[in-house]
Image: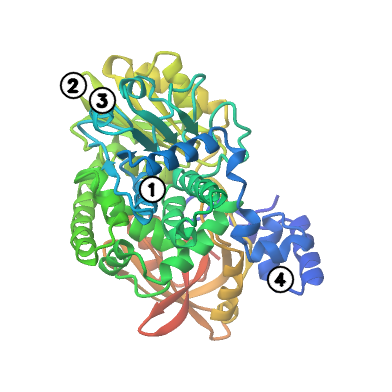
Amino acid sequence: MTAYLGVETSLTGRRWVGPGTERERQAEALAQATRLPLALCSVLAHRQVPPDEAAGFLAPSLRALLPDPRLLRDMEKAAARLLSALKSREKIAVFGDYDVDGGASSALLLCWLRAMGHDATLYIPDRIDEGYGPNEPAMEALARDHGLIVCVDCGTLSHGPVAAAKGADVVILDHHLGGETLPEALAVVNPNRQDESGDLGHLCAAGVVFLLLVEANRQLRDDGVRGPDLMGYLDLVALATVADVAPLIGVNRAFVRQGLKVMAQRGRPGLVALSDVGRIDQAPTPYHLGFVLGPRVNAGGRIGAADLGARLLSTDNAFEAQKIAAQLDQLNDDRRAIEQAVREEALAQAEFRGLDGPLVWAAAEGWHPGVIGIVAARLKEATNRPAVVIALDGDEGKGSGRSVAGVDLGASIQRLALEGLLVKGGGHRMAAGLTVTRDRLESAMERLGELLAKQGAGQGGAGDLRLDGLLMPGAATVGMVETLEQAGPFGQGAPAPRFAFPSMAILDARQIGTGHLKLRFGDPAGASLEAIAFGAYDGPLGAALARRTPGLWHLAGKVEINSWGGRNRVQLRLDDAAPA
């Protein structure tokens, strides 16, 4: 296939690939059949949406897309046990993970139980002292004082800790890959159990918890009791879905679309306070969930008090919410500084080891365990390869990995654990965690690279940049962008459409903030558009475009609406550029 606009190697080292002839024909046929704009039909064709399903796709309904919770094994049993604990006034503990998905999942349960007149105990383990998931001392202690322990976003591989909860029933609501055997819990509700079909494997833990609450409300209705209105809980499900990088397909699209509407009503004190410290002054978008709210919720679990995120999301006290949000905002600033130092060291180490294999990895003593996941994500983005970053402490190291599309990292790490090369490990397709002894570190990473190579990891360089078509500045109107957004929400598994602006002149370019590039470009007809490239000075874009050397440029990126000072304007979020 010929490179789009003839760009074989862009500034970021990528080859540009445009829509093929077949997709262009499909888009034109869709436009004729539906009378929708061609640009929107190009996105629908990319998603393989047939004409008779276009209307439903553009208006995803939770009623139409929500699966029957009972499709998941143990769901009825789990909901019935939760209701029996309520009825008998048993003490209930919620044991959650320390990330956004765990915090939101915990908050869903805590808020629902509070609406039913029951205050549950929240337990979030400390990342450094206790590590991920249930541990035996904590489960033993909770079991002494509680009749029911509900583990959310964790527990599927926790055989020992579940067995240690003597005298209490344990219900697990999770989405991480299951092993060949399950813990001896009363119920394990997980779409990624090995005996599940996998049809709902795209759900994050908060999505699983939401389905449990749907089932619990259904069982309440059967007994003539009205449960809490669950539509108001979708802001938490949307936040977790985006922040946990769950693919925005199926019911996840409806979760996020409807959840953003709920969030815009500013009814949850914790999200209101967090939006305010994050200076969100417009209707929330998936970008805000993933890059403004999510990192702040995560900051408590990474370098602060592990339960701050869940407490913020579950509180109904505005003053408490403002106090916790301020703490998380400061912790997020501290996290950025720690992350920058670790990222520089990890990238240097990975470059020395070589970036052309199927796996990029780095390990060192003294790295903060709370930032290794973010650093792994940065290495993955820079190299288009699965990446693992490991913080060594004594004879062991705790690592976090991030994967690329089409490569199941969680399954490979789980296999390493079964082969005895890891102390433990697990996760899902795009993200995973592990514990490894220092003496097996090299052999474990070598074996992991072999497993990932069999899935196609490491083939090629930084990867192709896929484009949906051409645009000119004059056509990039607010109305046009709003039309495109009907195909959203955009995110993992549903990328926002990316367009090329051919033969543009750079009219103005300057550095703003910490390494970001702000520019204005225009065409020969006199139309112009603003663009921003975040972190451009960490790569080749900033230096090349800011020079404003004579000549024209092909620019590529995503068009979006920038709301500022009461005005809506279109800007290009610049991803790449090449000399015209």
Which residue does the numbered mark 1 point to in the structure image?
109
Calculate the distance from the C-alpha at mark 1 to the C-alpha at mark 3.
21 Å
Question: On the rendered image, what quadrant is the C terminus found in?
Answer: bottom right
User: Dots 3 and 2: beta carbons under 8 Å?
Assistant: no
Give the residue displayed 49% in from the left and 30% down from the top: 177
Which residue does the numbered mark 3 point to in the structure image?
140
Give the residue displayed 38% in from the left and 44% down from the top: 86
Q: The disc labelled 4 sits on which kind of residue? A: Leu
| Residue 38: assigned label | 4
In the displayed structure, would residue 302 be above or below residue 574? Answer: above
N-terminal of the pair, mark 1 or mark 2, is 1
User: Dots 1 and 3: beta carbons under 8 Å?
Assistant: no
| Residue 394: assigned label | 2
Calculate the distance from the C-alpha at mark 4 to the C-alpha at mark 2.
59 Å
Density class for disc 1 (Cα within 10 Å; few <14, some 14-19, many ≥20) is many
Viewer-side residue, 580 vs 131? 131
N-terminal of the pair, mark 4 or mark 2, is 4
Calculate the distance from the C-alpha at mark 1 to the C-alpha at mark 2.
38 Å
Dot 2: what SS?
loop
Residue 505: where, in percent of width, then height? Answer: 49, 75
What is the quadrant of residue 349 in the picture?
A: top left
In the displayed structure, would residue 388 be above or below residue 265? Answer: above
Dot 3: what SS?
helix
Residue 156: where, in percent of width, then height? Answer: 43, 29
Q: The disc labelled 2 sits on which kind of residue? A: Gly
Density class for disc 3 (Cα within 10 Å; few <14, some 14-19, many ≥20) is some
N-terminal of the pair, mark 4 or mark 3, is 4
* Residue 479 visible (yes or no): yes
Density class for disc 4 (Cα within 10 Å; few <14, some 14-19, many ≥20) is some
